[in-house]
Image: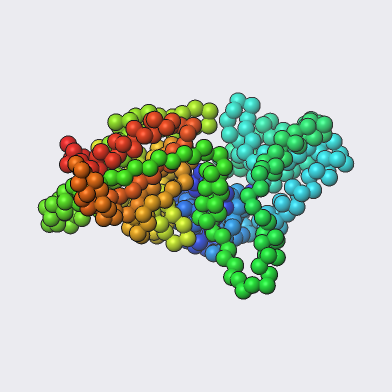
Amino acid sequence: MPTEILMPALSPTMEEGTLAKWLVKEGDEVKSGDILAEIETDKATMEFEAVDEGKIGKILVAEGSAGVKVNTPIAVLLEDGESADDIGSAPAKAEAAPAAKEEAPKEAAAAPAAAAPAPAAPKKADGGRMFASPLARRLAAEKGIDLAGVTGSGPNGRIVKADVESAKPGAAKPAAAAAAEAPKAAAPAAAAPTGPSTETVLKMYADRQTEEVALDGMRRTIAARLSEAKQTIPHFYLRKSAKLDELMKFRGTLNKQLESRGVKLSVNDFVIKACALALQEVPDANAVWAGDRILKLKPSDVAVAVAVEGGLFTPVLKDAQQKTLSTLSAEMKDLANRAKTKKLAPHEYQGGSFAISNLGMFGIENFDAVINPPHGAILAVGAGIQTPVVENGEVVIRNVMSMTLSVDHRVIDGALGAQLLDAIVKHLENPMGMLA
């Protein structure tokens, strides 16, 4: 039987993607590990590898198609001895799937034996993962067949249409039980509204000249995650300023010494190092929210917000407390450059317990950043400004940088957050100690 190649989930947050480029064409022979296509996720452009060998019988999703849902068939793979004639109406089946889902409640009401569609990722009785094609799952639901008792004849034991057709119907889930579960399934739809509807806004500006901008995967993800963050994370904010005069002098000296190596340290490099060391000194603040518990990290894995076209990335500098300033600088430049071309791998922008958002380079004096879950805190860094400061009864001009620490109160209490911010400021005001 021909095998459907499905749109993969290339990151934990991916729900849909763009099929940017096909690297194979119909009729090409492929084997496991061959690169089939380039797929744009919400964060990066990644290569998609074949897991089985065979011949590309038909490409179902055209190059450049956006909004392709995860697990949607994008191509059909033929095994030895199979031809394109065996594919039949694969595209029609793929398109018919949503309609079948919509009609499922009507069928369930008319015939109690017709259960709701089988779950997308069924499991065997022993807890192992069971693979079945979307068509096989739908047929099993219609016939009342428990897929846990079906042996798959497809690649890697995958259950296909023929396996379901030859299986004996079993007891379907009673309609009453399905009806009892319906309110649970509908629960997510009862989420709090996120603002006026599209129709309401369009009517409001119907008499004004406007331009609609379609949301890409990155902007949709940013909107969803930050809305979730502000709605679910109890933010509070701590503010403190650091005098940068010693740091600027020290940075100038180091950059002269490192010039022959092509290294130029930025203020942001010092901020990263200061935060990494502070997280080691205040270990209770080096933590994330894990749903029903707090997870404390041993290393200082510091994420840094990087602006890119259409959104931002937060690549993570892992074990930052152990790295020299020049190493952090080089790693940050590499991550930032690859972020701007969407070439970061998921493990390079996922994780960390703490983040830094620096808008000082844009002249922003101070601001409040939104925590990126599951992080426990994020530091908003403003510009260094010449400011009158009273020292020993005299007014002097100092280069002062304002910082705001946004804190998840579920993870970090006020006093603990204050200790963390104080440790960061002390390192920035005594930069030589960061080399010890």
Q: Is residue 166 left or right of residue 279?
A: right
Residue 355: image x %, image y %? 39, 44
Closer-to-camera residue (349/125): 349
Q: Is residue 188 left or right of residue 378?
A: right
**Residue at 60% over, 48% down:** 71
What is the image's colouring?
rainbow
**Residue at 28% over, 40% down:** 425
**Residue at 44% over, 47% down:** 369
Closer-to-camera residue (76/183): 183
Residue 215: image x %, image y %? 56, 60
Where's the C terminus, which quadrant? Answer: top left
Q: Is residue 352 left or right of residue 99?
A: left
Closer-to-camera residue (128/276): 276
Residue 373: image x %, image y %? 48, 41
Q: Is residue 242 left or right of residue 169?
A: left
Residue 111: image x %, image y %? 86, 39
Outermost residue to the top: 126
Outermost residue to the front: 393
**Residue at 63% over, 30% down:** 124
The answer to whether residue 375 shows anywhere in this view is no
Query: What is the quadrant of residue 423 in the picture?
Result: top left
Instruction: Please give the count of numbered marks on the rendered protein.
Output: 0
The answer to whether residue 128 shows anywhere in this view is yes
